Amino acid sequence: MLVSISHVTRYTLAAPALYSIQSLRLTPPSFDGQKVASWGIEMPHIEGAVLFRDCFGNMADLVAIAEPHSAVTITARGIVETQDRAGSVRGLLETTPVRVFKRETPKTAPDEGIRALAAGIGGRDTLERMHRLMTAVHESVEYIVGVTHAHTSAAEALREGRGVCQDHAHIFISAARAMGIPARYVNGYFVTGRAEPAEAHHAWAEAWVEGLGWLGFDAANGLCPTDRYIRLACGLDSSSAAPIRGTRRGGVEEVLDVVVEVQQQSAQQ
């Protein structure tokens, strides 16, 4: 499947910032089942960006704006070709030991509810248990926008019983780690299948299954990633896998606007 993606992020400030620096994880990798046909990022001073791979192997651009500014627009767009690999993640440059992804973070620390969820998951092997965990999270948390926020933890979202894809991923990761299974957070894009472009920035989880490697599990939709998924970056949770992270000197009352459009393309386009 050929997929076109446009990801536009706008920061507007009531008073100018004197200096800012942004770390961008906005370039999807090529690996088995995902090939980047074309990609580019536009923003002020992107030509001077320092390119690097972070500790999780994500491709990143470090961009500094050393002049007063009241607004910044960051645009990432391109074409990616995908194949359905039933959630299998192979061919990535893996720089982090698998055991690191057992580490708890504030967003994924388990409470009694998470541990009870994990303890109730049976199965003949790790693969079956992860599928059952995905189904359990999907059934436990209703997808509703606006109930949770960017800083909501897995434990809080499970207690609420409502949330979005970030919350489903955090709960899955927290429970998997409570079961002793390495798991990581993935952000990317999702093709909805509609004829028109759709806003579809998405998040899911990957778990390590001995003998098979990393496998994707999307508890929000209750399925393993297919060719409708475009993988962007991974981390311990949504913070470390965020597409954009940064800091600035000065500037107040930030307003953030994000527009993501994802659409399947025909081979002739």
Image (cartoon, rainbow, N blue to C red):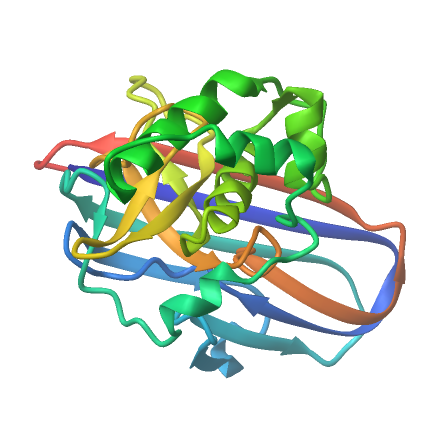
Query: Does 205 appear above or below 18?
Result: above
Q: Quadrant of the C terminus?
A: top left
Q: Residue at x 15, y 42 (%)?
A: 85
Q: Where is residue 165 drawn, in percent x and y?
A: 52, 32
Query: Does 79 appear above or below 16?
Result: above
Left or right of 226? Residue 122 is: right
Q: Quadrant of the N terminus?
A: top left
Q: Where is residue 215 drawn, in percent x and y?
A: 27, 47
Left or right of 207? Residue 83 is: left
Query: Does 2 appear above or below 221?
Result: below
Q: Residue at x 54, y 19 (%)?
A: 140
Left or right of 123? Residue 13 is: right
Q: Residue at x 52, y 41 (%)?
A: 175
Q: Classify residue 94 by image quadrant.
A: bottom left
Total numbered labels placed on residues in the image = 0
Q: Classify residue 217 by image quadrant.
A: top left
Left or right of 261? Residue 256 is: right
Q: Where is residue 90 drawn, in percent x and y?
A: 19, 58
Q: Residue furthest left?
A: 268
Q: Residue at x 46, y 71 (%)?
A: 60
Query: Does 149 appear above or below 240?
Result: above
Q: Where is residue 76 drawn, in percent x and y?
A: 44, 54
Q: Classify residue 214 by image quadrant.
A: bottom left
- Relative depth, front residue between 88 and 193: 88
